Amino acid sequence: MAKRYTRQEFLDRLWATVKAGKPLVMTGAGNGIAAKFIERGGIDILGVYNTGYFRMQGYGSLAGMLPILDNNELIYNMGKREVLPQVQEVPVIAGVAGVDPLRDMRLYLQDLNHIGYSGVHNFPTVAWYDGEFRRTLEATGLGYEHELHMINIARDLDMLTIGYAFNMEDAKRLFAEAPPDIYIFHAGITRGGSTGYSEGRGIEEMAEISQKHYDFARSQKPGVILLAHGAALSGPDTAQYMVTHTDCHGVQLGSAIERMAVEQPLEARAAAFKAITFPEGSQRWI
């Protein structure tokens, strides 16, 4: 069963890795077997997200932004029954829908911590929406402020906090009202594979805009941990590019570790089994 860490214990582990000269790797895990073997690969943070669940069912990440399942119920049950029992030492965080008027958020976060989650991340997030729909959400009381409130509650409960933003306006709100321990600029849906978004940002553009966010984040909270995510960051080579060309401390992986790790290998292995043959001259039919 996963070990529960205090916020400071969690941070101490992360900074020890960075100070040892090793970039951080945070990944999602959409089921128990993914969590089991991702941890064996030596990653630093494991996240449980509704997107991970949908990815491992064969759907695109944006399924997690649609009203298909109750995110907070899913994350609780998926963690308790599938992921947390397979984890030994790596800290596990929960992707929490902060805009949830049907729950007492403090009680819910206490329940998450009780079963083994050591931190939270504001995902799914209204930050992914823009235009008239986003403005209407904000104007009707279903906006980003609920996610910021959730992050602050988690901090009060001694849980590590991770903050997402998709643009500078939301980044400014995040650091003004709920400065997180880890900041992740989401550069967009990951490229590649069966459900990737091929028209997303290239790696050079991703690095450039991410660095602007990192500069801002450090101006607001010098000790914040910075992770790169999304868009062209789809493999170890592009992860290396982000670490080399920006000030990030490491990377966060979703599709790049869950979906892409199984799509082609499973197809190739199935094809290899299908390629077996009967011995020459053998007849096994009537």
Image (cartoon, rainbow, N blue to C red):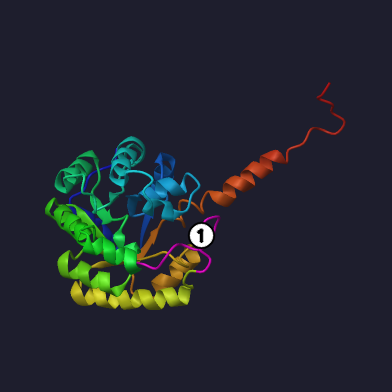
**Near-viewer residue (251 or 170):** 170
Residue closest to the far right:
281
Q: Is residue 177 visible?
A: yes
Q: Residues within 10 Å of mark 1 (few under 14, many from 20)?
A: many
Report the magenta stretch's main SS.
Answer: loop
Image x and y of residue 184, in percent = 31, 65
Determine whether 148 is above or below 111 in the image.
below
The percent position of residue 28, horizontal first and vertical second, equals 38, 52
- Screen quadrant of the C terminus: top right
Quarter assignment of residue 162: bottom left
Side of 278 relative to 43 (left or right): right
Q: Quadrant of residue 210?
A: bottom left
Residue at 41 percent across and 45 percent down: it is 53
Task: Give the residues in magenta.
Answer: 184-199
65 versus 216 height, above or below: above
Residue 245 makes an appearance in the image: no
Look at the numbered disc 1 and give the secondary structure of its residue.
Answer: loop
Question: From the viewer's perspective, is 185 left or right of 160?
Answer: right
In-front residue for pair 199/226: 199
**Residue indicated by mark 1:** 196
- In this figure, what is the number of numbered marks? 1
Residue at x-position 25% and y-position 56% = 13
Instruction: Identify which residue, 247 or 149, lies in the foreground.
Output: 149
Residue at 35 percent across and 41 percent down: it is: 83
User: Up-down: is 78 above or below 148?
Assistant: above
Which residue is found at the position 21% from the left and 69% from the top?
A: 173
Q: Is residue 224 magenta?
A: no
Q: Is residue 188 magenta?
A: yes
Residue 242, image x, y percentages: 41, 71
Is 198 situated left or right of 163 in this image?
right
Instruction: Name the amino acid, label 1.
Output: Gly
Q: Position of residue 101 (x, y in %)?
A: 20, 49
